[in-house]
Amino acid sequence: MKTPETSSLLINEIFYSVQGEGPFSGLPTIFIRTTTCQMRCRYCDTDYAFYEGTKLRTPEIFHKISEYPCKRVLITGGEPLLQKKEVLSLMNVLLQQSYDVSLETGGGIDLVGIPEDVHIVLDIKTPGSGELEKMNWNFLESPPKNMSMKFVVTSSQDYEWSKAFIRKNKGFFKNYPIYLSPVVAQYNPQDLAESILKDGLDVKLQLQLHKAIWGNQRGV
């Protein structure tokens, strides 16, 4: 497979699994996890990606992903957009090679320049994350066409904040899928489900499928 040379990307891991969250949950996917993150969410379950990583060029990344019988790629982190120039280049090459590409981002960096064919999964930080003040809200003014949004809720207070935010911006949110994902160790999914039903909130409750299958095992 011919791919152009690019500058190096700091990569934490590349593996093949099923997606555990979001609009493509349950689908076989190649995960490209980048290194570094500017946020320190209290519930983070991938803190090993803060520092661990190896520099790989595009041909090396393609050599690794070509081992898997799959044409769906999720770029995640860490925070991929901290290496924005290099990640944009990688996404464009993946699209040229007929991969379906999605991007998970923590919401702290603007989404300008991301190709329209890339599906963005945007994590909107709740107060319980401890990182609400680091959100970049520019997406509300210049929204991408191809996007879904996730709220990780740690408590009933996070749920009430999320509900108020969604209703305040209902004209915006009506155009996108919205997922509410409880931190199960802190907030009972049944309580979240009952609150969603009681309030008639038009969102999807989301549990982490990969953890139901493999627990906290890394690289699956």
Image (cartoon, grey):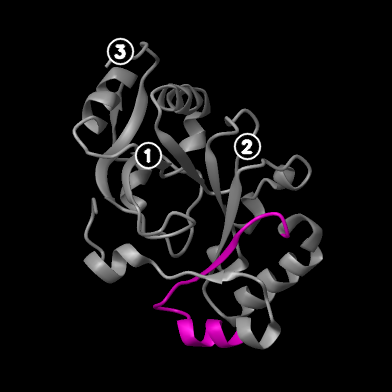
Q: Earlier in the sequence, mark 1 or mark 2?
A: 1
Total numbered labels: 3
- Is 150 magenta? The answer is no
Q: Which residues are magenta?
A: 174-195
> Between tags 1 and 2, which lies in front?
1
In the picture of the structure, the residue carrying the numbered disc 3 is 2
Q: Residue at x 63, y 58 (%)?
A: 132
Q: Nearer the viewer, mark 3 or mark 2?
A: 3
Q: Secondary structure at mark 3?
A: loop
Residue linked to disc 1: 73
The kind of residue on which mark 2 rests is Leu
SS assignment at label 2: loop
Residue 48 in the figure: left or right of residue 79 = left
Q: Which residue is under mark 2?
A: 111
- Label 1 secondary element: strand
The kind of residue on which mark 1 rests is: Val
Badge 1 density bin: few <14, some 14–19, many ≥20, Cα 10 Å: many
Task: Quote the CA–CA distance across marks 3 and 2.
Answer: 28 Å
Residue 176 image point, x, y percent: 65, 55
